[in-house]
Image (cartoon, helix red, strand yellow):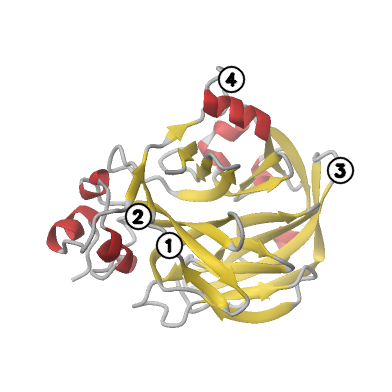
């Protein structure tokens, strides 16, 4: 029997321990075009002291190929500690990618972003039904952070783990001199041998390394100290094909109080990288405190120094830019 309710799971399958951490979520109010739900954000990344917010469809903002958005770390920190009393208003970062969207059949937008110095990497999702395709593209951000220019003549297809409706490589990470991309679906019943794709900074494929089985969806990744990093691990109850009666993380760590009352699962999971593969750490997942049955479609994740995490949703239930303190 497929189970769509975390609360039901918890009551029917008591875990050995119940030590999963549940953290409150603080919404940081945005202003301007970035606050509109049509921003449909799909990724976050730091460029130095500036946070870049990636809309899935940049062409919705401005002329030409559209725009991304930027916020200063200083303003974000002021909003988190309460010294900034007004909404955060991101500035636009013009996107220059002539012909790229048109060159990819059934283009479905940009899904993730990461920087190595001034070089930027983005994943793209495209396709129709289960005939999906993922792509990796690179470019540069200008010194004044006013423009990102993509190398439209260097677009590499990312082989997908298996055909799956509306799923591709939706998370990206840099480790050392490698770019890693992660497929969205890695549950044991659906993906028997999950793997991360590895590329060099010229987008040359460097093979694959093992990735752990983890249920539900992986929608973004964020580097932490050393070789450790965090991923968003999210279950939307409408994704009945991703429901399971065997979630090893729930069985090992349990769930927090609000997760026993609402059907969605919203958590951050720590992993560690080595050239031989990616594994789960022994750190308990950080579950986000839920307020209602309205699932937050978490799409972007970064660390905010040692304070905690910044997350952003797409348009469901609305555009939400959030801070979660580290436990």
Q: Label 2 neighbourhood size at 10 Å, few (<14), some (14-19), many (20+)?
A: many
Q: Label 1 neighbourhood size at 10 Å, few (<14), some (14-19), many (20+)?
A: many
Q: In this rendering, which labeled residue sits more in front, label 4 or label 2?
A: 4
Cβ–Cβ under 8 Å for marks 2 and 1? yes
Q: In this rendering, which labeled residue sits more in front, label 1 or label 4?
A: 4
Label 1 sits on residue: 217
Residue appearing at x 40%, y 45% in the figure: 296
Q: What's the distance in space between the residues labelled 4 and 2, CA to CA?
A: 33 Å
Q: What's the distance in space between the residues labelled 1 and 4, CA to CA?
A: 34 Å
Identify the residue at the far right of this view: 143
Q: Label 4 neighbourhood size at 10 Å, few (<14), some (14-19), many (20+)?
A: some
- The image shows residue 268, relative to residue 40, as above or below, that is below
Pointer 3 or 2: first along the chain: 3
Residue sitting nearer the eye, 119 or 66: 119
Residue 12 at x, y percent in the picture: 13, 62
Residue 147 at x, y percent in the picture: 81, 43
Based on the displayed image, in which of its 4 quarters is residue 99 positioned?
bottom right
Residue appearing at x 76%, y 76% in the figure: 204
Q: What's the distance in space between the residues labelled 3 and 2, CA to CA?
A: 39 Å
Pointer 3 or 4: first along the chain: 4
Q: What's the distance in space between the residues labelled 1 and 3, CA to CA?
A: 35 Å
- The image shows residue 276, relative to residue 116, as above or below, that is below
Pointer 2 or 1: first along the chain: 1
Q: Quadrant of the N terminus?
A: bottom left
Tell me: 26 left or right of 276: left
Label 2 sits on residue: 236
- The image shows residue 145, relative to residue 16, as above or below, that is above
Q: In this rendering, which labeled residue sits more in front, label 3 or label 2?
A: 3
Instruction: Name the disc covering residue 143, or none.
Output: 3
Residue appearing at x 39%, y 52% in the figure: 267
Residue sitting nearer the eye, 106 or 233: 233
Label 4 sits on residue: 84
């Amino acid at each position: 029997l497929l189970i769509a309710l975390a609360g039901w799971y918890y009551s029917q399958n008591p875990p050995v321990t119940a030590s999963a951490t549940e953290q409150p979520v603080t919404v940081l109010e945005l202003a301007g075009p970035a606050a509109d739900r049509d921003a449909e954000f799909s990724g976050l990344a730091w460029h130095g002291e500036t946070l870049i917010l990636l809309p899935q469809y940049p062409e919705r903002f401005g002329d030409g190929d559209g725009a991304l958005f930027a916020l200063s770390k200083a303003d974000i920190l002021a909003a988190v500690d309460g010294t900034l009393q007004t909404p955060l208003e991101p500035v636009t970062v013009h996107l220059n990618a002539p012909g790229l969207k048109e060159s990819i059949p059934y283009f479905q937008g940009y899904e993730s972003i990461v920087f190595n110095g001034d070089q930027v990497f983005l994943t793209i999702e495209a396709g129709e039904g289960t005939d999906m395709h993922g792509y990796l593209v690179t470019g540069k951000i200008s010194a004044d952070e006013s423009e990102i220019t993509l190398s439209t003549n260097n677009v590499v297809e990312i082989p997908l783990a298996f055909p799956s409706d509306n799923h591709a490589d939706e998370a990206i990470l840099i480790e050392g001199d490698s770019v890693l991309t992660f497929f969205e679906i890695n549950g044991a019943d659906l993906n028997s041998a999950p793997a991360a794709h590895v590329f060099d900074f010229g987008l040359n494929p460097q093979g694959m390394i093992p990735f752990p089985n983890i249920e539900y969806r992986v929608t973004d990744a964020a580097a932490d100290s050393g070789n450790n990093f965090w991923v968003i691990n999210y279950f939307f109850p409408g994704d009945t094909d991703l429901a399971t009666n065997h979630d090893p993380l729930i069985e090992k760590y349990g769930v927090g109080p609000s997760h026993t009352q609402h059907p969605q699962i919203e958590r951050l999971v720590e992993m560690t990288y080595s050239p031989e593969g990616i594994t789960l750490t022994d750190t308990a997942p950080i579950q986000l405190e839920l307020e209602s049955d309205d699932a937050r479609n978490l799409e972007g994740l970064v660390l905010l120094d040692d304070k905690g995490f910044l997350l952003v949703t797409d348009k469901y239930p609305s555009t939400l830019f959030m801070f979660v303190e580290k436990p």
